[in-house]
Image (tube, helix red, strand yellow):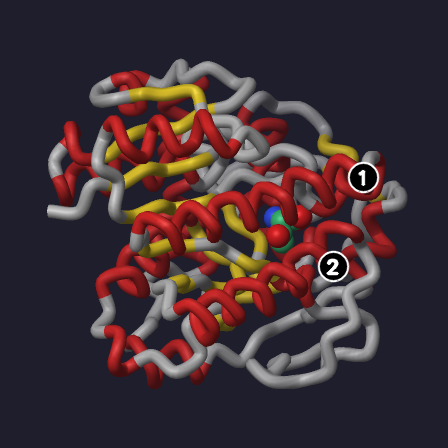
């Protein structure tokens, strides 16, 4: 069994990934590493929990040694919208944090999962069916750190033989922890308003199409890539993965099938320019070929499941 550390365990992806990894590898083999947000979800407290600041290399080493960690899922990051408010912090957490993890991985022979994002693309990248290999000119600090991180990850693979793997996630929709500081967060927030019978003010234009994925597929992608036979992987870091694309208006209309009369108002803010610089749909054929990636959840099934799960949560 691998001995896993998840850095960013209380974040949107971490809080779903930790329980999935514990189910698979045993709860004592998966350490939930949090930074400022203390774990509240019972699933995270159901096994080892440690405070891990990615900027503190010594503290990271201590956790690695204490639990004989051989696998790290490094998810801690400042996302796109938050990064535009504090670009220096985004650079520090996203780049210094990543290189600390990669250096620790190099020294201890640790396998690393590190997610990139559709934010690594930019205004000159093709918008539809964006290929794996194409023009990359990100215009947000988050996107710049994601693109630089992909290059850095591959550098550690080529130069030091470190086993670094990762996908480029689209927007992720989840019913567990809320996302924070992203441009695609509307696609989660909107469900809370709909279920509480409130009008939602969307910060993106109604026709802003973005690639998205439901959390169970995001978790599956991470675990499947990490368990793939290394000899099959050529790219290693930054695989395009996607499930479906939709606009805020299409999402609102799908929700209205269950909650008729749900109202949405569109008032674009600074996040519109970020969304406009990103792909509208992705070509994920390289991930499909190299490690058998295939999403399970459709847009319609995701909306129905979100309403059921959140409906239960909100009582
Ligand atoms: C964000 O919106 O910043 C993230 C992402 C697409 O990487 N969800």
Camera-nearest residue between 141 and 171: 141
Q: Quadrant of residue 301?
A: bottom left
Label 1 SS: helix
Q: Which residue lies most toward the front here?
A: 107
Of the numbered discs 2 and 1, the one sitting upstream in the chain is 1
Left or right placement of residue 219 versus residue 169 in this view: left
Frontmost residue, 60 versus 44:
60
Q: Is residue 210 visible?
A: no
In the picture, residue 202 is in which quadrant? Answer: top right
Say whether residue 264 is left or right of residue 291.
right
Give the labeled residue for mark 2: 144
Residue at the spot 30% in from the left edge and 76% down from the top edge: 291
Residue 218 place in picture, x, y as percent: 40, 54
Q: Residue 93, image x and y in percent?
A: 65, 38
**Residue 19 x/y as whole percent:** 26, 34
In the figure, 46 relative to 122: above or below?
above
Which is nearer the eye, 77 or 127?
Answer: 77
| 200 sits left or right of 260 in the view | right
State the quadrant of the C terminus.
Answer: top left
How far apart are the two marked residues, 2 and 1, measured between alpha carbons? 12 Å
Q: Look at the numbered disc 2 and give the secondary structure of its residue.
A: helix
Can see residue 215? Answer: yes
Name the residue carrying label 1.
88
| Image location (x, y in percent) of residue 53 | 52, 27
Q: Residue at image x 69%, y 63%?
A: 209
Ligand 1 lies under 8 Å from the Cβ of mark 1: no
Q: Which residue is pictured at 37% across the width and 38% down the height?
A: 6
Residue at image position (63%, 33%) is 180
């Amino acid at each position: 069994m691998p001995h896993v550390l998840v850095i960013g365990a209380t974040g949107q992806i971490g809080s779903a990934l930790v329980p999935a990894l514990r189910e698979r590898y045993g709860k004592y083999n998966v350490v939930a590493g949090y930074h400022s947000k203390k774990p509240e979800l019972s699933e995270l407290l159901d096994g080892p929990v440690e405070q891990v600041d990615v900027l503190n290399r010594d503290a990271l080493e201590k956790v690695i040694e204490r639990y004989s960690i051989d696998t790290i899922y490094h998810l801690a990051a400042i996302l796109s919208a938050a990064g535009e408010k504090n670009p220096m912090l985004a650079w520090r957490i996203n780049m210094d944090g990543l290189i600390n993890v990669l250096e620790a991985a190099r020294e201890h022979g640790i396998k690393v999962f590190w997610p990139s994002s559709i934010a690594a693309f930019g205004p000159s990248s093709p918008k539809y069916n964006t290929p794996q290999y194409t023009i990359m000119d990100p215009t947000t600090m988050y996107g710049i750190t994601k693109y630089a991180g992909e290059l850095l990850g591959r550098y550690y693979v080529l130069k030091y033989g470190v086993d670094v793997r990762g996908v480029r996630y689209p927007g992720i929709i989840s019913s567990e922890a809320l996302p924070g500081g992203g441009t695609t967060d509307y696609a989660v927030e909107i469900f809370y308003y709909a279920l509480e019978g409130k009008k939602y003010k969307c910060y993106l234009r109604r026709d802003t199409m973005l690639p998205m994925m439901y959390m169970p597929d995001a978790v599956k992608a991470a675990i499947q890539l990490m368990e793939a036979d290394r000899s099959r992987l050529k790219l290693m870091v930054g695989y395009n993965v996607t499930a479906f694309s939709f606009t805020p208006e299409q999402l609102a209309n799908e929700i209205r099938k269950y909650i008729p009369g749900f109202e949405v108002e569109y008032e674009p803010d600074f996040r519109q320019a970020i969304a406009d610089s990103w792909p509208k749909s992705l070509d994920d054929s390289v991930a499909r070929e190299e490690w058998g990636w295939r999403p399970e959840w459709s847009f319609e099934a995701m909306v129905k499941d979100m309403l059921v799960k959140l409906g239960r949560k909100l009582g």
